[in-house]
């Protein structure tokens, strides 16, 4: 019986493992080998600067602290939001929830444009302040500073904490909370001693994701931070693409992977050892309307914050897409739908939407399937070993997109795996990044299911599949949904490795946006903004519909 | 659950249909960078006449695309590669990934563009990287715009310029080369020191410099930007309302611009060398060359190509661009960028 179980678990895990070996380890090892052991120059010569120059130590330090600060700030701002989404019902909840996902799909250049139209030297706020207070210089000078990209990191990652912690929090039994208060604990004591420990798996999952995201931040730091700031990821791009120093790029990639791997491993061990099982499936977990004055204030304050942080930049963008030289115009949208430039790469916006959604659905399907299989395996594996697997699965997220993209070129180049210029590589590359995400979303929920519950079901004669289908699946349903939503948006935003994947011209929305931004001219910029707004609206309405059904 | 399965099944089907795009028999693949563009009609006419189907593979920016071509040496991803520029020419030739082809159409291309004497890389287009100024801003503020890159370090142009980072941007690199060609290896760092003291903004990419900081294209506060000499016609061509005058102007006085030349080459290891040569001829021929200006906003290399009206009216070329040889660029790239970074950013 036991052996049969092990066999079943491993056969379940074989699919995600095969995927990782084929599309992650094999290309990565090949590019590392090529970088270190081939070429005319003996690598140590090309690598000596890594130690001799103080620059790289500084870059590593900067990368680490900005990721830590970004993570901390995101948690501070987003945890109260997660609470109100878990516990309260309020007007426009699904819409708010959908809107918080939008930053995730926006290209960095577009986000930068949105923030600048608000906070830039001639942005709305500065212009307003200068005219009302009669100032000669703009009071807010945030461009190309640390604050700008910290703000952007919060903007991008807020929703991660909100959704992952929020969905987990909603499943906590509020009776525990009431019981603790009845026993005389203050709200703070209750939070610290009861709620926080129970929440920890989800909070740490979300925090880990945010940290890795900010650690590997490329576009945000590149554009908003300006060139004085460099993360390891930016340096990898510089070394490989501009200087063609592949050994150095590979060494930096390796450092990035090792640092993140250690962190993910420590995280996995802590979480695996501190697992707390609980099960709450009572109707009391339904969210309620805010009743007291304090509660209402708390809800409103949070929504106000979200409005300022997330929604004003998006509105600024929308406004820009309908503003021409003489005020409001739909000229950019009209132009989007005409083939005036006759370019062979022109795509109808509808076709671009179709391509984006098609890729996103494929990537989501792959990622959710693999994520479910992998997290079921990890959750059922005993402590020590499971944390190693857990950390290994997270690796694609912490790996440089440039390195991996080049790895594909030299590894997936012979039949039957001649995929390097295939369009199939695009959803695969998206799924590779999305799959660890799905695992992070599902695993905390899966682990909270008490072993006794599953054992009871087996004792009553349920087959392993039936246990999974009838016991586990209903409990983790919401976590799967959240994971799927993230996988979908990662793909919609063309996040990560796909930027360096060679492909035939299948224009997705982000590709179309970049094509417009590549040339000067008012119509190009306007159409880029219009396309971004469409991307925003498509994403928002998809998630709004899902959220509405879910609530 | 059922619904989930339906979604899964249908997206798998969709994926399969995307993978199984059937290739016609004589398909020639052109690998290129993301900024490549061509008209549908021009390609369709060629395909009809030659019986060759063209397939374009886009592989990131010019630098990233070239590296992917180099990495796939021996088992190339494509038959041709378009988009090596003179700043990467030496790297491409050193990697030995191109086959020589002396196209008969080279006779129509000026000799000064033909940098590779063995014809492994053939010039297709060129353009000058130079300063662009916001004419309206200077008129409104009653100031004289700069006429030479040396002007930028004067006090009257303090905090007016935005440039691109040569470590991450190809026009940024070209502009750095312009300053090296102009002030020499001994003098260019002094110029950049002056520019730093004059509060230059360095953006990491052209998009960010132009659409993020340039007054004429954004809510930025910089009326001087590093862009192309052919940006003003693009501004007119892509204006929202019809313009009779370009709102921006390119500064192309002597030794103030750097000429970027883009090349095409046949990749070693192609299985269809005959057809690949036909495609090179097509790219150098008048129909393709006349399509270049309005698709990519650079100048055609073939001197028989007629320029579109908007180019004749608004585009300029530098008479004497600053010159740095491709070999010198490849040998010194790292040292120059490093020295520039230390001077301007650290």
Image (cartoon, grey):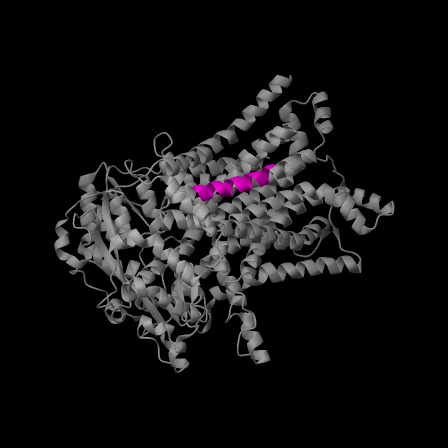
The answer to which image quadrant residue B98 occupies is: top left
Residue A493, compared with residue B204, is above or below; it is above
State the residue in front, A454 or A19. A19
Asked if one can make out residue B336 in the rendered structure from this viewpoint, the answer is: yes
Q: Is residue A501 left or right of residue B70?
A: right
Residue A260, compared with residue A383, is above or below; it is below
Asked if one can make out residue A422 in the rendered structure from this viewpoint, the answer is: no
Q: Residue at x 54, y 70 (%)?
A: A124
Q: Residue at x 76, y 55 (%)?
A: A290
Q: Residue at x 72, y 52 (%)?
A: A88
Q: Residue at x 53, y 43 (%)?
A: A487
Residue range of the region highlighted in magenta in the rendering: A251-265
Picture coordinates of residue A387, whole percent (x, y): 61, 33
Residue B155, compared with residue A49, is above or below; it is below
Picture coordinates of residue A326, whole percent (x, y): 44, 74
State the residue in front, B271 or B238. B271
Q: Is residue A375 left or right of residue B153?
A: right
């Amino acid at each position: 019986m036991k052996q049969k179980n092990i066999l079943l678990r491993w056969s379940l895990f074989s699919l995600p493992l095969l995927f990782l070996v084929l599309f992650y380890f094999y290309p990565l090892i090949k590019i590392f080998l090529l970088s270190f052991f081939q070429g005319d120059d003996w690598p140590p010569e090309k690598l000596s600067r890594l130690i001799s120059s103080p620059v790289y130590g500084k870059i590593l330090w900067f990368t680490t602290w900005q990721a830590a600060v970004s993570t901390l700030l995101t948690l501070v701002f987003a945890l109260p939001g997660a609470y109100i989404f878990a516990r309260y019902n309020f007007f426009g909840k699904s819409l708010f929830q959908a809107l918080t996902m939008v930053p995730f799909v926006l290209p960095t250049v577009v986000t930068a444009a949105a923030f600048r139209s608000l906070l830039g030297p001639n942005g709305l706020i500065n212009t307003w302040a200068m005219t009302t207070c009669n100032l000669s210089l703009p009071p807010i000078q945030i461009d190309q500073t640390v604050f700008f990209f910290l703000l952007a990191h919060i903007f991008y990652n807020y929703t991660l904490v909100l959704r992952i912690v929020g969905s987990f929090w909603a499943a906590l039994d509020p009776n525990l909370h009431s019981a603790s208060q009845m026993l005389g604990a203050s709200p703070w004591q209750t939070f610290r001693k009861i709620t926080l420990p129970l929440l920890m798996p989800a909070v740490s999952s979300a925090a880990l994701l945010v940290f890795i995201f900010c650690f590997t931040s490329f576009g945000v730091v590149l554009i908003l931070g300006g060139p004085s700031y460099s993360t390891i990821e930016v340096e990898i791009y510089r070394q490989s693409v501009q200087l063609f120093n592949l050994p150095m790029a590979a060494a930096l990639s390796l450092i990035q992977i090792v640092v993140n791997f250690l962190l993910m491993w420590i995280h996995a061990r802590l979480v695996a050892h501190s697992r707390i099982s609980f099960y709450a499936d009572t109707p009391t977990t339904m969210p309620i309307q805010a009743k007291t004055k304090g509660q209402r204030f708390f809800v409103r304050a949070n929504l106000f914050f979200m409005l300022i942080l997330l929604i004003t930049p998006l509105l600024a963008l929308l406004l820009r897409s309908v503003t021409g030289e003489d005020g409001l115009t739909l000229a950019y949208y009209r132009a989007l739908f005409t083939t005036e430039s006759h370019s062979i790469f022109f795509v109808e916006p509808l076709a671009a939407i179709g391509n984006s959604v098609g890729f996103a659905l494929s990537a989501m399907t792959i990622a959710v399937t693999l994520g479910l299989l992998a997290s079921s395996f990890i959750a059922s594996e005993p402590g020590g070993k499971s944390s190693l697997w857990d950390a290994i699965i997270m690796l694609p997220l912490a790996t440089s997109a440039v390195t991996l993209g080049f790895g594909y070129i030299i590894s997936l180049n012979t039949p039957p795996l001649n995929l390097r210029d295939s369009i199939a590589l695009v959803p695969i590359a998206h799924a590779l990044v999305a799959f660890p995400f799905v695992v992070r979303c599902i695993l905390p929920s899966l682990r909270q299911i008490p072993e006794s519950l599953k054992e009871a079901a087996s004792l009553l004669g349920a087959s392993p599949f039936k246990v999974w289908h009838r016991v586990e699946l209903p409990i983790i349903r919401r976590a799967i949904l959240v994971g799927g939503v993230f996988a979908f948006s990662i793909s919609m935003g063309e996040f990560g490795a796909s930027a360096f994947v060679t492909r035939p011209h299948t224009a997705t929305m982000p590709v179309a946006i970049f094509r417009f931004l590549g040339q000067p001219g008012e119509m190009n910029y306007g159409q880029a903004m219009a396309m971004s707004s469409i991307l925003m609206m498509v994403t928002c309405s998809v998630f709004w519909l899902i959220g509405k059904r879910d609530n | 659950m059922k619904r989930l399965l339906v979604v899964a099944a249908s997206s798998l089907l969709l994926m399969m249909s995307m993978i199984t795009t059937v290739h016609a028999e004589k398909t020639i693949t052109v690998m290129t960078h993301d900024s490549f563009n061509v008209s549908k009609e021009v390609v369709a006419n060629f395909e009809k006449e030659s019986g060759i189907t063209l397939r374009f593979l886009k592989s990131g920016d010019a630098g990233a695309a070239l590296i992917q071509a180099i990495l796939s040496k021996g088992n190339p991803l494509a038959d041709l590669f378009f988009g090596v520029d003179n700043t990467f020419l030496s790297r491409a030739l050193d990697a030995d990934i191109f086959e020589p082809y002396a196209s008969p159409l080279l006779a129509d291309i000026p000799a000064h563009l033909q940098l590779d004497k063995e014809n492994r890389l053939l010039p297709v287009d060129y353009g000058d990287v130079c300063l662009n100024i916001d004419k309206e801003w200077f008129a409104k503020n009653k100031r004289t715009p700069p006429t030479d890159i040396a002007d930028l370090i004067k006090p009257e142009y303090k905090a007016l310029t935005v440039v691109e980072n040569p470590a991450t941007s190809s026009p940024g690199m070209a502009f750095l080369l312009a300053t090296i060609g102009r002030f020499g290896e001994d003098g260019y760092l002094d110029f950049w020191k002056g520019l730093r003291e004059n509060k230059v903004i360095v953006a990491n990419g052209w998009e960010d410099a132009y659409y993020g900081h340039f007054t004429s294209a954004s809510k930025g506060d910089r009326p001087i930007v590093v862009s192309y000499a052919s940006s003003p016609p693009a501004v007119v061509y892509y204006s929202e309302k019809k313009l009779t005058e370009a709102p921006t102007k390119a500064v192309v006085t002597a030794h103030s611009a750097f000429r970027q030349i883009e090349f095409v080459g046949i990749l070693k290891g192609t299985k269809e060398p005959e057809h690949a040569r036909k495609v090179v001829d097509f790219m150098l021929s008048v129909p393709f060359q006349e399509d270049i200006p309005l698709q990519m906003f650079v100048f055609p290399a073939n001197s028989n190509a007629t320029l579109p009206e908007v180019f004749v009216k608004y585009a300029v070329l530098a008479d004497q661009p600053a010159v740095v040889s491709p070999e010198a660029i490849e040998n010194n790239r790292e040292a120059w960028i490093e020295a520039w970074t230390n001077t301007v950013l650290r």
